[in-house]
Image (cartoon, helix red, strand yellow):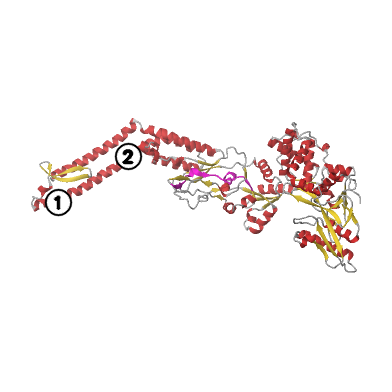
Amino acid sequence: MQPLPSEKCRRTTNLDSFSFKTTAELPVDMEIVGQPRGVRAIEFGIGIQSHGYNIFVLGETGTGRATTIKRFLQGRTQDEATPTDWVYVHNFAVPHQPRAIALPAGQGGVFKQQMAALIQALKRDLPQAFDSDTYRDSIETVQQDFETRQGELLSIFRQQCAAAGFALVQTTKGFVIAPMQDGQPVPPEQLQGLTVEARSRLDAAYQDLSAELEDVLADVYGMEQETRQQMKRIDREVAGTAVQHHFDSLKQSYAAEDEALLYLNEVHEDVLNQIDDFAPPVDRQDEIDLRRYEVNLLVDQQQMEGAPVILESNPSYHGLFGRLEYEMNAGMLTTHFTNIKAGSLHRASGGYLLMNAHDLLKSSQAWEALKRALKQELIHVDPMARLETSQVLAKSLDPEPIPLQVKIVLIGSPGLYYALHEQDQDFSTLFKVRSDFDITMPRTPENELAYARFVANRCHAEGLYHFDASAVARVIEFGGRLADHQGQLSTQFGLIADLLREASYWAEINGRSTVTDLDVQQALHERTNRANRIEEETFELILDGTIFIATEGSVIGQVNGLSVIDTGEYAFGQPGRITARTFMGDEGLIHIEHETDMSGPIHHKGVLTLNGYLGGTYAQNQPLTMSASLTFEQTYVGIEGDSASSTELYALISSLSRVPLKQSIAVTGSVNQRGEIQPIGGVNEKIEGFFRLCKARGLTGDQGVLIPASNVQNLMLHEEVVTAVSANQFHIWPVHT
């Protein structure tokens, strides 16, 4: 069994393949790195415009999908049409249903300013128009004509009354008819002295005159109405003349915008009907509300070039659909159309909206509303969505929905995608494009250069120090370590970007203006130091003898196994003693962890596989009668996995054969029923964990680790391990069976 040469333990980067000295020489690149399948799916999704072809991007956390896809889309959409602005305005016909008006990109803000300027101009010009001699003369003429006609009519009637012995008397309650004698009203007591015949004639005359008075007053009222109409016509003519040029200019600007033009016509008519609002008496100024003429600029695309690409970090209901804000007035809630606020669907309409699927599904209200909006292709602002049931609502609104034309890009894990596909009947009809993002990509010269371009992009975007070629090489090797494969690179660019930021920081601390490989190494070292407290404590327990791990000598039925402890942001390898005892009996193989419910189903499968191997190898012609026990010594937490099954097999065979095993050699690997050694995970951490212990106790030259031969391609060991292997101080033996 030959140990691996050092060049098989780590794949390094050939600096001669780089034509640049620092990443400052590389161009900024918006392309997505290492995801040809995913990119092709996204390009298909943004290209097809049929209903339901929204995109779900699958991938693991840390691949930088959200920001990467956003930059990718921004690079693709600059040549697309910029969508319209949207404004809400008062609905003069149905005030509680504000109208939505679309305007060309950038015109919404202009329209808002023009309407504000118009109202200010009207507040200035209308009072001036009515403060003129011409206007006053016209009103006075109409008033005098009314008074003349009224006087003539009443004069004729007074004469009729006088001829009949009556007078027309004006009181605080109106006109009354009173009998007269010698030019003076007759007191009621004098009427008592009249004869019945005289009183009868007087009553008849009074009734006739009263009927006539009603007709006269009706004529006077008609004259008053006619006079008011004449005055109103004069007011409209004067106001119309004063405002006409303002509206003509504005209407001409929006002649091609039907909805805006219709609104301007309605405003024009309302102004002429509500002239007093622009010059109210002092005691009514607080009552006048001209906010009905304001424009609520909901979506402003003035700064947009091409289609919008919005990354919504808080996809709640209000984050997506906007909200209607309320004001407290006299203990009750009121609102106004200017209180309508946009959501990300409004801002992304005509473009693309990116969201984290997990965050979106935290709110069932948001998810159901989004599906409804995609089906109806409308954005509704729910006026009741934000109210507490205990609040008293005096006035609310029902804003006109806005058309929705958007491509949704959801980003989530494969598990979430499959769950939605299985459990939500609408999902497959609304998200027909699946874009798979892999966590690794082939380690080719082209992809190594793509890594370098990614480094350059982050340096440009975040103002980091640029990396020299040696530093880029270290970053590439870190990507290989993340991928756990010599022929692969990680596409977890979120983690790569973190390393770039930290290395740039240490370069600054070290007084360098360019990041070198030393800064990258320091960033990795410092990161480990921040996270490896548990590893250090466990290591000290081994060194002081609290945890029994031998690294020299030979023992029957005892072997050093290797496991990986993952603390979240940091994982490390740890050796552990596995022992086997065999004795007479027919109980078969007993695994103590299984018997004490401290192992999981995969580990138990590995134990049963050992039974299969033993039976198939040693019990073909006669029964295998034995009793044996296996255990992980000094393990007090649950264990899972079958990566130690070959290690357990060595311990068991050693106990049966009474052949001692070297304690200077640790073992990892899964075994099948035919005795073939199968690959396992965490091979780098496991080797490094045992190497560290051996180094601390002193390297002897016969220490090392047995690993599955199929795991050789996964080796990306730390340089100190590679150096020890090169010096024959530590060994790695690949095994097949």
In 3D space, how far apart are the residues under numbered discs 2 and 1 (Cα atoms)? 39 Å
In the visual, does 248 lie left or right of 614?
left
Q: Label 2 amino acid?
A: Gln
Q: Label 1 amino acid?
A: Ala
Q: Which residues are magenta?
A: 331-355
The crowding category of the residue bearing disc 2, from other C-alpha atoms within 10 Å (few below 14, some 14 to 19, many at least 20), is some
- Front one among 627 and 276: 627
In the visual, does 713 lie left or right of 86?
right
Which residue is drawn at the image coordinates 20% and 49% (left, top)?
A: 211
Can residue 601 be seen from the camera position used here?
A: yes
Q: Where is residue 558, by image quadrant?
A: bottom right
Q: Are marks 2 and 1 in contact (CB under 8 Å)?
A: no
- Front one among 600 and 175: 600
Q: Residue 591's x, y, as percent?
A: 80, 61
Q: Label 2 belongs to which residue? A: 230
Q: Nearer the viewer, mark 2 or mark 1?
A: 1
